Amino acid sequence: MASRTWDLLANLPLRIDSVSLEPLKIRVSEDFERWTMHVTLRGERSGGPEEGHGEDVTWEVDDHRRLLEHGPPELVGEHTLASLSRALGDMELFPPSGPSRYASKQYRRWAYESAALDLALRQAGQSLHDVLGRKPRAVRFVASPGLGSPPSIRPIDAILARQPEMQFKLDASSAWSPNLMRTLSALGHVKILDLKGAYRGTPVDQPADRTLYESLLQFFDDVLLEDPDLTDEVRDLFDDVRLDRITWDAPVHSTADIEALPFPPRVLNFKPSRFGSLQALFDAYDHCREQSISIYGGGQFELGPARGQIQYLASLFHPDAPNDVAPRAYNEPVLPESLPASPLPPTPRSTGFAWDEET
């Protein structure tokens, strides 16, 4: 399917004169340091030098270290967004040893394609919303704190003490006690429960657990249920709620993935970096509009420009959804005393694919 949205962007010209990389880091806990890679494309047009920014949200630190050792791909030259995207699709963006995870290929490609979009728009003297003919709107967002080990209500209480109206997207776990679920349900602030059932071989794997699923369905009767593991042992539990409440995230990288889901979805979580290419993302936006599928946005613990970019996309395509795109302050190891409120006012820059994020 040709994407009408992508057609508005595909032929934008851009000139790339250099590519640079900058690792971004934050120590989250004693055993977890989050790395991402800030990608900067520089190029000169008639108006002078410009920069485009993107972010590789690959999770494995060793993949980022190897990228710094080997350097970025050769992207210098004259392109259109479409020709650069095709070239990136043919390139090996990782060293011969390959990425630690397949999804990382998508994340890295997105870093270069989003930076190229930013640069092309800046060189054209236009903003993303101008080219797409869409008006940025205030972005509703939810917070998604971890509940610790053992799980506790304390992280929720800490946020509500600063923002009493905040709503939440939480990762459900077999470690949750009935008492914790009862307390969370009584708050009335949980909008999405991520069951993590589509992950394999990651630190966040949560295999199908009939006891957990039964409890979640008992305590949370109006909450979206993301990525359940629909094995034969648990599938019957969702017979009455699957159309209205089940949503998908990790399996969705393209329109083809949406069409291959176990049943036609009514709502999906879009993480732009999962799609890899700009065209794949905008194709999927068009598909969901045509099929009346609702979308909410998701993040990948971005540390740099990609956080603002996913907020920008949410402002254009799904501003009123429970977007998991909270400002970075919500991910700080120690919460600041003041936290931005939802919804975020629209703050796109006058040119480019850039959003001045509240911290």
Image: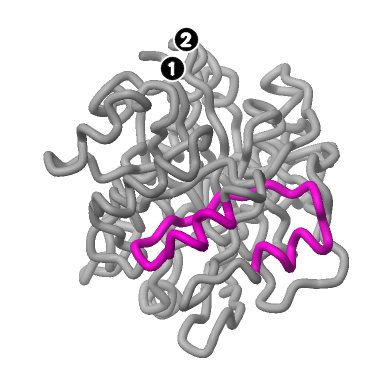
Inspect this view and state whether residue 325 appears. no
The quadrant of the picture occupied by the C terminus is bottom right
Crowd class of label 1 (few under 14; some 14 to 19; many from 20; radius 10 Å):
some
Question: In the image, what residue type sits under mark 1?
Answer: His
Horizontal arrangement in the rendering, residue 206 relative to residue 145 (left or right): left
Residue lying furthest top: 290
Viewer-side residue, 347 vs 321? 321
Magenta stretch holds residue 45 = no
* Disc marking residue 287: 1
Image spot of residue 150 (x, y percent): 47, 77
Q: Quadrant of residue 239?
A: top left
On residue 296, the disc is: none
Q: Left or right: where does residue 341 sit relative to residue 240?
A: right
Rendered image quadrant of residue 29: bottom right
Coordinates of residue 144 in the picture (x, y in percent): 59, 56
Instruction: Specify the label residue 290 is tagged with.
Output: 2
Pointers 1 and 2 in contact (CB under 8 A)? yes
Helix or strand or loop: what does disc 2 sit on? Answer: helix
Residue stretch in magenta: 155-184
- For image coordinates 65% across by 35% down, the residue present is 314
State the image coordinates of residue 73 (x, y, percent, origin top left).
41, 60
| Residue type marked 2 | Glu
